[in-house]
Image (spheres, helix red, strand yellow):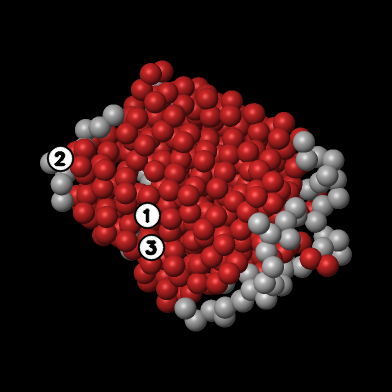
Amino acid sequence: MSAVFIAFLVIGLAIPVLPLHVHQGLGLGTFLVGLVAGSQFAAAILSRVWAGRYSDASGAKHAVIAGLMIAAAGGLLYLLSLSVVTAPATSATILLLGRAVLGVSESFIITGAQSWGLAILGVQNTSKVLAWIGSAMFGAFAAGAPIGTALYALYDFTGIALATTPLATLALVAPLRRIRSTVPVRAGLLKVMAAVWVPGVGSALSSVGFGAVTAFSALLFVARGWPTWPAFTIFALAFILARIVLGHLADRFGGAKVALVCVVVEAAGLALMELAPRLALALTGAALTGIGYSLVYPGLGVEAVRRVPAQSRGLAMGAYTGFLDVALGFGTPALGLLASVAGLGAVFIASAVAALCAAPVAASFLRSSAHPVTPARHAACRVSGL
């Protein structure tokens, strides 16, 4: 969790200021804002399965270390993009590549960390593992938002680029004990995909709102004369608090029940962010969005993980998380196009509708999740090493 926190603190510094850099610094439109913001997730789509297989085959520790090395390369590309800011198209292209490299690094770091946690705590604690690792990631994003805003105000995007090199995190990871894979036979990709695609679709639909908050909340707040960073920070803090306090619910009561309630809360929060006439109400909407979104991913993740053999859980985590990347990689640019046509408010209404569309997906698992994951039911397929 500490390694994930530090790595994503560095990676997340750009979240609140990247739209401003592209839109105001480079003078490009909202569609390109969405394209640049979403390119990280689009690249992650292509690398999730690779990261999952690497984690299963070489060990979760090696996957995390590889991700940290790749992230440093992304920071160097950020710097390179600044050398050609007088040519906005070229600078944006290099920035797109840097974001894509960071997407690959994110795949290896988060997939490796999730697999590592499952190996340590066992499948009966799937929701806790996903919730706690995710809390570390979003805690980093929450801290990164004001830090990134301050760096951008003092040093422009150069400060962000220089900070995007999480190699120091290796000092935390290197001494830790490696957990080896001890089961040579693994399920094929198609078999794993068949097991996780339905919960993956539900997770993707709920993640459209996350893309809206990360890419467009700063622009929405600026347009209304409000501070840029509080929306995402409030979102992330509410997200973390919900996961810490409520992260066990999916393991106890079933992931589908928890996810079904949470997508409705998320949709309400997104709608409130658009409709709120005052900053306090808009931040309340951001908090509701964070609370709602917080348990959808681990809730449906419980339904995904319980359907695959223990020796392929790294691949399953990579494939399942890939659906989130599909939503962010393609949905965020689509939201940018929608914003250019119908305004920023339409982005949050469309995201609320997408979250509500995840409700039937969660409901489809209610019967099978009536008996939640327990140690006794999974003793025969306990994680033997990832």
Report whether residue 105 is seen.
yes
Label pair 2/3, CB-CB below 8 angstroms: no
Q: x, y (%) of residue 33?
A: 33, 35
- Three-letter amino acid code of the residue under disc 1: Val
Indicate whether 103 appears above or below 112. Answer: above
Label pair 2/1, CB-CB below 8 angstroms: no
Distance between the alpha carbons at the discs numbered 1 and 3 = 7 Å
Specify few, some or many for label 3: CA neighbours under 10 Å numbering under 14, 14-19, or 20 or more: many
Specify whether 21 is left or right of 317: left
**Residue appearing at x 21%, y 33% in the figure:** 27
Distance between the alpha carbons at the discs numbered 2 and 1 = 21 Å
Q: x, y (%) of residue 183?
A: 69, 72
**Residue appearing at x 37%, y 54% in the figure:** 101
- Three-letter amino acid code of the residue under disc 2: Ala
Q: Which residue is mark 1?
A: 101
Specify whether 189 is left or right of 5: right
Which of 98 and 146 lies nearest the eye of the viewer? 98
Q: x, y (%) of residue 248?
A: 72, 55
Q: Earlier in the sequence, mark 1 or mark 3?
A: 3
SS for callout 2: loop
Q: Which residue is mark 3?
A: 70
SS for callout 1: helix
Q: Which residue is mark 2?
A: 87
Label pair 1/3, CB-CB below 8 angstroms: yes
